Image (cartoon, rainbow, N blue to C red):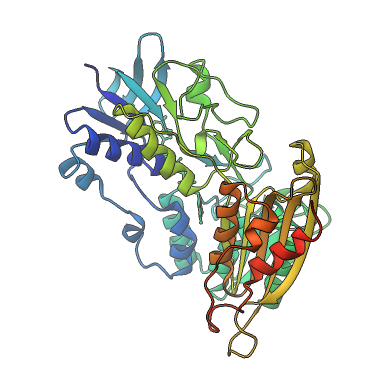
Amino acid sequence: MDPIVIVGGDAAGMSAASKLKRERPEREVIVFEKGAYVSYAACGMPYFVKGAVDSLDDLVTITPEAFVEERGIDLRLHHEVVGIDPEEHAVVVEGPDGRTTQSYDQLLVATGAHAVVPPFDGMDLDGVFTMHSLPEADAVRDYLASAEPESVAVVGGGYVGIEMAEAFHAHDVEVHLFEMLPHVMAPFGETVADHVEEHLREQGVDLHLNTAVERFVGDDRVAGVDVGDRVFDADLALVGVGVAPNTDLAESAGIELGETGAIATDAYGRTSRSGVFAAGDCAEARHVVTGEPDHVPLALTANRAGRAIGQTMAGDETPVGDIAGTAVVKAFDLTAARTGVIDEERAREAGFDPVSVTITASSRAHYYPGAEELTITLLGDRDTGRVLGATMVGREGVAKRIDTVAVALHEGATAEQLSYYDLAYAPPYSPVWDPVLTAAKVLDGNVG
Ligand SMILES: Cc1cc2nc3c(=O)[nH]c(=O)nc-3n(C[C@H](O)[C@H](O)[C@H](O)COP(=O)(O)OP(=O)(O)OC[C@H]3O[C@@H](n4cnc5c(N)ncnc54)[C@H](O)[C@@H]3O)c2cc1C
C-alpha cells in the first residue's frame, strides 16, 4: 500500500502524523516540510521578540529527531511539495536532491497561511519584517540587537500588531502603530477596541488610526513611514496586516476553494478530491453558530482538525469539530477576547435578529483587593434567546470567562440557560454572580 503523505509540518500536519502513527504504527507516514522547523509555536514569537522567551528552541514543541526516532514518522525537512496529481494519487516534491514524485494512498494538505505583504514600496528595505515564521522572529530580534532602533513602526492593529507593539515597547523604543481602519482589532468589536486603544495610549504607544501607510522610505535600510501627508521616523517596521491561506498548491490540483478563499472541506476535513484532506490555516471549518463554512486561522483549530483527520485516515472516521472563533489576546495589561458571532450585520446575514447588551462588572468580590473592571458584550437572537457571541475586555479573569460563553455556543444555549450555569465562586476570583451570569441575565431580559 502507498504511504500516507502530509504536506506541511506544523500544528495540523504533525498532529495528524502523530495520531496516525499512534493508531496505526505499521502505516508509512511521510511528512514534507519545506522549512527547517516542525511543530513550532508561532503564537509564542511575539514573546520571543519581547524577551520573555529566551530561545527559539523553546518554541519548538517536539524536535524533528523525536518525530523520526520516537514516533516513526518519515519526516523530510527542506522538501517542498510543488504539485499534486489527484488522478494518479501522487505529489511532486522539490528537495535538496532535486525533483521527485511520491505516490500516496491518502493525502493531507496542511500548508497553513502566509502573512499578507501589502503592495507598497519599500517592503524590501532592511529592517522591514513580517511575523509568520521562526526565522522571521529570529531576524527581528537580531535586528533589534544590532541596529538598536529608536523608533519602530507597527503596521496593522490586529492581534499580531498589538502583541508586537508590546514586544517592541519592552525594548524601550518609541512605538508607532498604524491602522487604516477607525479602530484596532476589528474582529473584537468596537467596545473592546475602545478599551485597547485607550490602554495602548496610556502605555505610550503612538496610535495612528484611520491612517493608511503608503510606503516605507529609506536607502538600504528603512528610515521612515510615509502616510501620505507626513513621514514618520522608523528604523524598524513590522507589517502585520493579516494572513491569507496557502491554497495555490490545492487550487492548481483542482481542489475546490470555499467562499472564504480557503480550501473547502466537509465535516471530516475531506476536500473535493477523493483521498485528499485539508486542515488548519489553509482550510475552512464549519462555524458552530451560523452552521456555515468559515475561515478562522487559529492554533487549536489546526491541531484539532489534524488530530481528527489522522484518526480518520487510520480508519476511524472522526469529525474535525465546529469552530466558534474563540480568541484571547494580551494587550499589555489588558486582556481582550471574543467568541462566536459578535457583529450584528453578520448575525442578520446568518438569519438571526441580533440583540446586544453590554455590562461592566467586577472581576472579584468588590471588597477583595485587586478587583478590576470587566466589560462584557453578549449578542443573542431576539426570537429564540440563543446566545450568538461575546466579547470581553479587562485586566483579569477574561480568558476563563470567554471560554464559558464558548461552551454555551457549542451547546446552543439560550441566554436564560447560560444564566443558570453553576459557575465557581470565591472572593479572589469572582463576585457571587459571575459577570457572565449577570450579562446572560441582562440579555435574557431583552430577548424571547
Ligand atoms: C505571530 C503569530 C501569533 C499567533 N498567535 C496565536 C495565538 O495566540 N492563538 C492562536 O490560536 N493562534 C495564533 N496564531 C496562529 C497559529 O499559529 C496558526 O493558526 C497555526 O500555526 C496553524 O497551523 P497550521 O499547521 O495550519 O499552519 P502553519 O503553522 O502555517 O504551518 C504550515 C506549514 O506548512 C509548510 N508548507 C507550506 N506549504 C508547503 C509545501 N508546499 N510543501 C511543504 N511544506 C509546506 C510551512 O512551511 C509551514 O511549516 C499566531 C500566528 C502568528 C503568526
Q: Position of residue 373 (x, y in %)?
A: 68, 78
How many numbered discs sit on the rendered protein?
0
Q: For the N terminus, which image quadrant?
A: top left
On the question of residue 115 being in view, the answer is yes
Q: Is residue 417 above or below residue 431?
A: above
Q: Nearer the viewer, residue 96 or 58?
A: 58
411 vs 304, left or right, is: right
Q: Would you say 258 lies left or right of 358 here? A: left
Farthest-out residue, right: 229
The part of the image, by quadrant, that contains residue 54 is bottom left
Q: Is residue 163 above or below residue 186?
A: below
Residue 406 x %, y %: 57, 54
Is any part of residue 208 visible from this angle?
Answer: no
Q: Position of residue 14 (x, y in %)?
A: 33, 40
Which quadrant would residue 193 be assigned to in this image?
A: bottom right
- Would you place residue 71 above or below residue 318 in this image? below
Camera-nearest residue between 296 and 148: 296
Q: Nearer the viewer, residue 20 or 177?
A: 20
* Residue 374 in picture, x, y percent from top left: 67, 73
Tell whether 299 sits left or right of 258: left
Above or below for 374 versus 77? below
Identify the residue at image location x=38%, y=43%: 10
Task: Please state if 353 lies on the left or on the right of 294 as rendered.
Answer: right
User: What residue lies at 69% left-to-right and 43% top-to-bottom?
Assistant: 120
| Residue depicted at x 21% and y 27% | 28
Residue sitting nearer the eye, 367 or 125: 367
